[in-house]
């Protein structure tokens, strides 16, 4: 397949690298209207073709990866899809829920694959989290919490939730296999007047009786990439910074003993069990994502992170913007009929 990468920035250059390494890709096309950006990436991949615009490149590609700033995602993806090209769109797939819905509809009408660039869906550590939850290894789930913190990189086009929390939303929806019913968000603009650089997000899954929270920050002294899942029988910690032990399972917890006539209030007892570190065969998520995307383009299968997954994340973020403006008021997520069916296929 011939694959074009639109955008030669940080992520675009990574997509070019990965695609250039895959035997299933016969040609990579670097697409950017900035000659210096094309030249910079092209210097490392001299066999790649170079084009100034997606329109100019359409005859040279079978599929495209859109890795431009978020406010251009919809327009570029729509152009590719209506031209009959498969599209993988970096997160967030669009900047509004209506635009994300339109992309899903356009892809269905054109009969092409639409994939969302949710790299953590392709992270084997996230697969292990989903496995622990699906197998009830943690017992009944109480809550999920994620921290995604660092100093920078400030974005001029979106707030910290759209930039960082998008990852944790995608992780949560995959692990739970559901979209939250309501979202509440609150934050602060400490550095610029344009967008929140520190924010908190609470997602409520009414049917599962679970809440999931995310703390995201561009203004923190230490890089943190951590997800905690607390169950009635055990707890799991996913630390993406700890490359030697990304997943830890703690046999720890508490329970309320059955009340008796002598002790009508009951007593809380604690379990201080051991710690296990599941073995995870780690592979680069971006490589797995590209492999899955190409497989689906060839076969018509559904990507692990498909258009509906991208739509779900955009809808949650859209609701979070409304909640931020309303001082943390819970806002319904505008996806009443969307059911996620995660397709965890090891590729």
Image (cartoon, grey):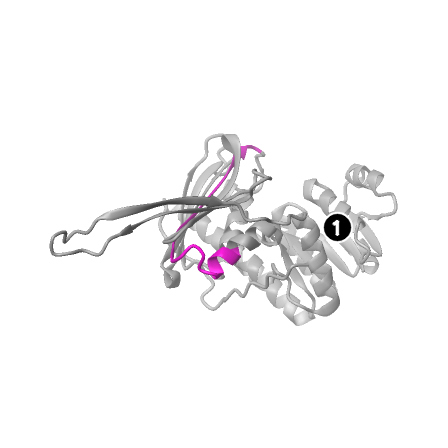
Read off the magenta span.
130-152
Q: Relative to 68, is 87 above or below?
A: below
Horizontal side, residue 258 vs residue 161: left or right: left
For the C terminus, which image quadrant? bottom right
Q: Relative to 142, is 159 above or below?
A: above
Which residue shows up at 15% across the image and 56% down it? 260
Q: Secondary structure at mark 1?
A: strand
Which residue shows up at 84% across the image and 43% down it? 45
Residue 313 at x, y = what percent?
52, 55
Residue 107 at x, y = what percent?
65, 66
Please indicate, yes or no, whether residue 235 appears anywhere in the rendered image. yes
Q: Is residue 86 magenta?
A: no
Q: Which residue is mark 1?
A: 5
Which of 255 and 149 lies nearest the eye of the viewer?
A: 255
For the N terminus, which image quadrant? bottom right
Residue that sits furthest to the right in the current view: 47
Q: Quadrant of residue 324?
A: top left
Residue that sits furthest to the front in the current view: 274
């Amino acid at each position: 397949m011939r694959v074009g990468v639109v955008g030669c920035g940080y992520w675009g250059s990574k997509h070019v690298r990965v695609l250039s390494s895959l035997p299933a890709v016969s040609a990579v096309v670097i697409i950017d209207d900035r000659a210096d950006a094309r030249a910079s990436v092209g210097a490392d991949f001299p066999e790649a073709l170079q084009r100034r615009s997606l329109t100019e490149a359409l005859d040279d590609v079978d599929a495209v990866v859109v890795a431009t700033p978020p406010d251009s995602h919809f327009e570029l993806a729509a152009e590719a899809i209506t031209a009959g090209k498969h599209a993988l769109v970096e997160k967030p797939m669009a900047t509004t829920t209506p635009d994300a819905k339109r992309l899903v509809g356009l892809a269905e009408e054109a009969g092409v694959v639409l994939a969302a660039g949710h790299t953590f869906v392709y992270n084997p550590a996230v697969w292990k989290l989903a496995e622990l939850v699906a197998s009830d290894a943690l017992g009944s789930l109480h809550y999920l919490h994620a921290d995604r913190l660092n100093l920078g990189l400030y974005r001029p086009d979106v707030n910290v939730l759209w930039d960082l929390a998008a990852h944790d939303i995608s992780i949560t929806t995959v692990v739970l296999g559901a979209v939250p019913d309501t979202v509440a968000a609150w934050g602060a603009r400490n550095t610029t007047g344009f967008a929140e650089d520190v924010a908190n997000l609470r997602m409520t899954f009414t049917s599962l009786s679970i809440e999931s929270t995310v703390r995201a920050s561009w203004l923190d002294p230490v890089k943190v990439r951590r997800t905690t899942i607390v169950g009635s029988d055990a707890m799991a910690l996913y630390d993406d910074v700890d490359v030697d032990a990304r997943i830890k399972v703690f046999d720890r917890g508490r329970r309320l003993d059955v009340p008796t006539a002598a002790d009508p209030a009951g007593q809380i007892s604690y379990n201080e069990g051991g710690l296990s570190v599941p073995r995870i065969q780690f592979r680069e998520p971006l490589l797995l994502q590209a492999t899955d995307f190409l497989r689906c383009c060839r076969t018509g299968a559904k990507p692990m992170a498909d258009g509906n997954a991208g739509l779900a994340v955009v809808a949650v973020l859209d609701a979070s913007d409304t909640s931020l403006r309303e001082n943390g008021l819970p806002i319904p997520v505008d996806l009443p009929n969307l059911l996620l069916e995660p397709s965890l296929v090891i590729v």
